Image (cartoon, rainbow, N blue to C red):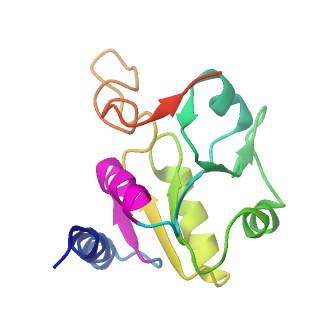
Amino acid sequence: MSQVNEILQRARSRAEQLGLSYSGALTPDEAQTLREALPAAKLVDVRSHAEWQFVGHPTDAVKVEWKTWPGMASNPHFLEQLRHQVDPEDILMFMCRSGARSHEAAVLAAAHGFAECYNVLEGFEGDRDEAGQRGRRNGWKARGLPWSQS
């Protein structure tokens, strides 16, 4: 079995274990491997514009806000904006700060006909460390995966 197939099988197994209504859950490293191996694999960063600008963002990620800053109000145009930037048949890997908003985005996208939706566990910044800070323990940044900052 190829590495891509192994990753997708693990992600689907996690979906079964967690009772997810979408295709699966990926680690940041698995998501990056899929991005490199599959042209149809798109990383969708659903954090706010402020987070992209001030915290950073994965390179070449599709950006669609799930909630907007300030106030973190839901983006009523999320699905429309997503459809404008990706093909519904693409493999979509949703990412937020820690994995919660991206889970919600994956649920909604899967319910509206997007074929393969995955949540990226740990998110961009990951869990808080002992000092209450993110970006050091786990997540996209802490794993040293490609990202940039404005």
Query: In the image, is 42 to the left or to the right of 138?
Result: right
Q: Which of 12 and 42 is in front in this view?
A: 42
Judge whether 46 appears above or below 9 on screen. Answer: above
**In the image, residue 82 lies in the stretch drawn in magenta:** no
Q: Position of residue 126 (x, y in %)?
A: 38, 36
Magenta residues (range): 23-37
Query: In the image, is 72 to the left or to the right of 128?
Result: right
Judge whether 99 appears above or below 104 on screen. Answer: above
Q: In which quarter of the image is the N terminus?
A: bottom left
Residue farthest toward the top in the current orientation of the protein: 131
Q: Indicate the quadrant where residue 6 lies.
A: bottom left
**Mostly what secondary structure, the magenta segment?**
helix
Q: Position of residue 90 (x, y in %)?
A: 56, 74
Which residue is rendered at x = 63% and y = 43% of the image? 47
Which residue is rendered at x = 64% and y = 32% of the image? 52
Q: In which quarter of the image is the C terminus?
A: top right
Which residue is rendered at x = 37% and y = 20% of the image? 132
**In the image, residue 32 lies in the stretch drawn in magenta:** yes
Q: Position of residue 80 (x, y in %)?
A: 81, 67
